[in-house]
Image (cartoon, rainbow, N blue to C red):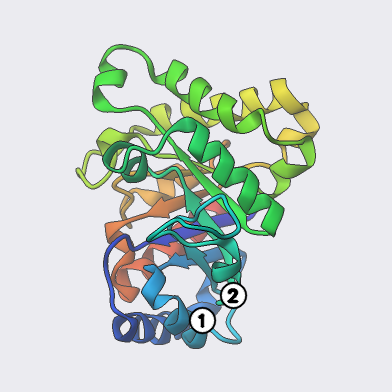
Amino acid sequence: MRLIIAANWKMHKTAAATAAFCQALRRDEALFDGVDVLICPPFTSLPAAAAGLQGSAIKIGAQDMHWEKQGAFTGEIATSMLLEYGVSSVIIGHSERRHLMGETDQQVSLKVRAALASGLQPLLCLGETETEREQGKTVAVIERQLSYVFESLAAEDLSNLVVAYEPVWAIGTGKAASVDDAEDAAALIYRLAADRFGAESAKGLRVQYGGSVRVDNIGSYMALPSISGALVGGASLEAVSFSALIQAARKAILH
């Protein structure tokens, strides 16, 4: 299964910085063969990304969206607005949206369904907090977060869905999950998908790992049988480090 390596820039980079990044990253594009590469800039930088990546195989993602097509939702963005700039994927349910902005499992489910209906590929984020982990609730949290989304999906939707397992305690902390923990979570996600939609449909799903992903550890995650990509934060902010990370991921699956 093809790897999908996505850069989540969060609240970083102006349009000018985005243009410069795209120009630099494209110099190494020939080294990314076989990997789906995705950058997710802030909304204000989507036009610069679209211009900078025109003619490139590197794709553009967004960091969030609203589930309604339009309306009185101040500060929100609709799928049609994202599609206008060539966006192909959208991050949904990132822990910062859930825990800082109060986004609920129900809202995440609505967004995933709306993204799929519009032709966007959802990158569904889920994972446990440090407290939940210490209390032995990791499995229960993943089951709960997935169940809300799965209720609104059909089996054929799995081939256009990416699930990013991002333990909240590992995001931006430098404390990455062990390979065993990452594999256990990813395997659980596949089992839940197979139980709900059948084993054959579950094969179309891709699972990423996210949380303090770096050049020196990405290879160990990509070599795991149930993981097919990474959602990268800080290490994606510089073109040189992000390029090196993609190449390390690619190398891990070729050997």
How many numbered discs? 2
Marking on residue 50: 1
Callout 1 amino acid: Ala
Q: In the figure, 243 relative to 117: above or below?
A: below
Q: In the figure, 179 relative to 10: above or below?
A: above
Could you say which is closer to the camera, residue 160 or residue 47?
Answer: 47
Could you say which is closer to the camera, residue 151 or residue 72?
Answer: 72
Of all residues shown, which one is farthest toward the left? Answer: 173
Q: Secondary structure at mark 1?
A: helix
Q: Residue at x 72, y 38 (%)?
A: 203
Q: Is residue 130 visible?
A: yes
Callout 2 amino acid: Gly
Could you say which is closer to the camera, residue 105 or residue 9?
Answer: 105
Q: Are marks 1 and 2 in contact (CB under 8 Å)?
A: yes
Q: Is residue 183 visible?
A: no
Q: CA distance from mark 1 to mark 2?
A: 6 Å
**Residue 199: x %, y % from top left:** 76, 28
Please rate how many residues cluster around mark 1, counting C-alpha atoms within 10 Å: few if below 14, some from 14 to 19, many from 20. Answer: many
Marking on residue 118: none
**Which residue is denoted by mark 2 in the rendering?**
86
Q: Residue at x 66, y 28 (%)?
A: 151
Determine the image quadrant of residue 30: bottom right
Q: In the figure, 181 relative to 19: above or below?
A: above
